[in-house]
């Protein structure tokens, strides 16, 4: 049965709507939509700037739908679509005000978001374990793996079992180990059964409910799916990362937009700092391995540190051959001296492909110590390309093709697509130009020359397109020409395209 939850809107919602209108007027690629197409009132609204769309194009494989601020302790019904960039930092894919909560409203929100991103749905999404959100997401993201936020479930478990935790101090840590440290389904099931029996919790309604949903939040069940966490046990699926410290219980609707922009600026600065450190400082190598040198040149600094940790640990986890079947050899990999616990790695010598039952690569995109140990045993000295995800590399933001982006029909859609492409190249150009004072001067000189070329092309376009459109009785080309003229007069349009891969700026 569907149920609705509605917030009483305040007049300050007009403040948000005015902001969205101003942003779209000054930036034609800025997207916003109100549910039902009318005024904000008590309807939901979604918005995304061009940077959010670019973020999704690069890092939209896994998404977190942050609805932390919907709870009654917060004054703004604010939600955000976020993810992780190639430095492991939070990135934004769009925001929403959720004033009316229903299955259909959440379905509208997910549909509008995917439409704004102009892309296919993500591989995975992490959401609050709320039935309205779950149904809305399932209706739109039918091919996406939906995971419940583990952190929220564990927090609520602590509240609901407070009396039991008080009586049995060791239960909480034991329960967390059951959730976070069991690697296989059979291990989890055995550990869970032991806990509920020993603490007489077999009839606890809350535990029964979260156990029934175990396939959507217990790590042992979902390690075959990519969630962008650099280690299977690093994160607990916490939601509010991007706006943490910017939006809190005292944030009002009037203050929300200011804090929203502060958060964007803060994380953009952090990404540029991480980019600078990755490009301009040398990683400290800990082994003579050529694979480590290769990884240091491919990965961003944060991701290389994770890989390096696995590589170093692989030396303490020797691989022992167990069996052979055709081209596939099975190995047991375990810490020296530990005979009871280990991991199983299957290696296909024909395809130079390995898989480990820890599933770390599938879950995080970083190869595990167990496979690295097998590679060393097989004298594989460099990382096969299949084990280097582009989204974790220094080149994560480079495009694979030079093709024009696909656009919908119509003048506005075409202009928006062009804006997105140019804005994308401009941001990368700025990042390159800021890396040193020498490159900065080269970039500024190129911008000055580009501004003159753009102005000349604009004047020529105005003369030729206006005459042709009037002669043929066409309006679309005339509209595009006028909009292009207005757009290039904006300061943020004065840029040149970044030099393509393989070219040098200096």
Image (cartoon, rainbow, N blue to C red):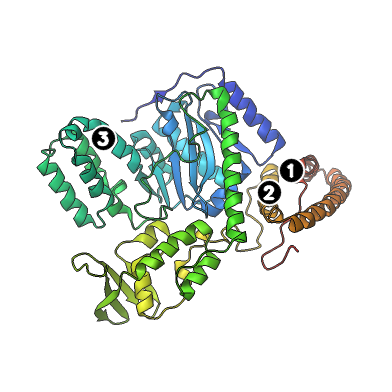
Front tag of 3 and 2: 3
- Label 2: few (<14), some (14–19) or many (≥20) C-alpha neighbours in 10 Å: many
Callout 3 secondary element: helix
Callout 2 secondary element: helix
Quadrant of the image occupied by residue 69: top left
- Residue sitting at x 55%, y 67%: 297
Horizontal side of 432 relative to 16 (left or right) equals right
Query: Gap between marks 1 and 2, in whole Å?
Result: 9 Å
Q: Tag 2 or tag 3, which sits nearer the N-term?
A: 3
* Image coords of residue 479 (percent x, y): 77, 41
Return the residue at label 3.
158
The numbered dot on residue 492 is 1
249 or 418: nearer the eye? Answer: 249
Query: Gap between marks 3 and 1, in whole Å?
Result: 50 Å
The numbered dot on residue 423 is 2
* Image coords of residue 335 (percent x, y): 27, 67
Residue 473 appears in view? yes
Labels 3 and 2 touching (C-beta < 8 A) = no
Labels 3 and 1 touching (C-beta < 8 A) = no
Callout 1 secondary element: helix
Horizontal side of 73 relative to 493 (left or right) equals left
* Image coords of residue 149 (percent x, y): 36, 42
Q: Tag 1 or tag 3, which sits nearer the N-term?
A: 3
Q: Tag 2 or tag 1, which sits nearer the N-term?
A: 2
- Residue sitting at x 80%, y 41%: 489
Labels 1 and 2 touching (C-beta < 8 A) = yes
- Residue sitting at x 39%, y 67%: 312
* Figure quadrant of the N terminus: top left
* Image coords of residue 376 (percent x, y): 38, 77
Quadrant of the image occupied by residue 165: top left
């Amino acid at each position: 049965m569907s149920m609705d939850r509605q917030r009483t809107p305040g007049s300050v919602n007009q403040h948000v709507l005015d902001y969205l209108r101003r942003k779209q007027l000054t930036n034609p690629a800025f997207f916003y939509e109100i549910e039902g197409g009318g005024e904000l009132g008590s309807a939901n609204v979604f918005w995304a700037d061009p940077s959010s769309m670019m973020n999704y194009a690069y890092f939209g494989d896994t998404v977190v739908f942050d609805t932390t601020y919907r709870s009654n302790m917060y004054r703004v019904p604010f939600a955000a679509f976020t993810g992780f960039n190639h430095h492991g930092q939070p990135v934004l894919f769009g925001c929403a005000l959720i004033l009316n909560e229903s299955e259909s409203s959440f379905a509208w929100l997910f549909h509008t978001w995917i439409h704004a991103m102009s892309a296919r749905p993500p591989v995975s999404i992490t959401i609050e374990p709320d039935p309205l959100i779950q149904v809305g997401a399932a209706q739109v993201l039918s091919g996406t793996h939906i995971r419940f936020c583990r952190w929220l479930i564990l927090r609520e478990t602590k509240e609901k079992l407070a009396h039991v935790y008080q009586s049995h101090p060791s239960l909480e840590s034991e329960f967390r180990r059951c959730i976070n440290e069991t690697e296989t389904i059979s291990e989890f099931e055995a550990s869970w059964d032991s806990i509920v029996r020993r603490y007489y919790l077999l009839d606890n309604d809350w535990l029964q409910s979260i156990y029934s949903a175990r396939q959507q939040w217990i790590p042992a069940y979902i390690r075959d799916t990519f969630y962008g966490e650099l280690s299977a046990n690093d994160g607990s699926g916490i939601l509010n990362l991007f706006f943490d410290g910017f939006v809190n219980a005292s944030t009002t609707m009037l203050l929300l937009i200011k804090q929203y922009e502060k958060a964007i600026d803060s994380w953009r600065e952090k990404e540029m700092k991480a980019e600078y450190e990755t490009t301009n400082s040398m990683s400290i190598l800990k082994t003579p391995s050529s694979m480590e040198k290769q990884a240091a040149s491919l990965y961003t600094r944060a991701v290389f540190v994770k890989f390096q940790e696995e590589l170093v640990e692989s030396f303490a986890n020797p691989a022992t051959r167990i069996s052979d079947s055709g081209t596939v050899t099975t190995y047991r990999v375990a810490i020296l001296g530990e005979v009871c616990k280990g991991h199983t790695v299957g290696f296909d010598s024909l395809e130079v492909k390995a898989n480990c039952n820890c599933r770390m690569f599938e879950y995080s995109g970083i190869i595990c110590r167990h496979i690295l140990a097998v590679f060393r045993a097989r004298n594989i000295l460099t990382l096969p390309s299949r084990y280097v995800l582009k989204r974790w590399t220094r080149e994560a933001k480079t495009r694979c093709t030079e093709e024009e982006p696909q656009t919908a029909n119509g003048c506005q859609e075409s202009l928006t697509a062009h804006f997105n492409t140019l804005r994308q190249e401009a941001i990368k150009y700025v990042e390159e130009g800021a890396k040193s004072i020498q490159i900065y001067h080269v970039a500024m000189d190129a911008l000055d020359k580009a501004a003159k070329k753009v102005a000349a092309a604009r004047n020529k376009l105005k003369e030729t397109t206006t005459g042709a459109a009037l002669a043929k009785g066409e309006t679309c080309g005339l509209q595009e020409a006028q909009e292009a003229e207005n757009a290039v007069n904006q300061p943020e349009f004065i840029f040149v395209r970044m030099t393509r891969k393989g070219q040098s700026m200096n």
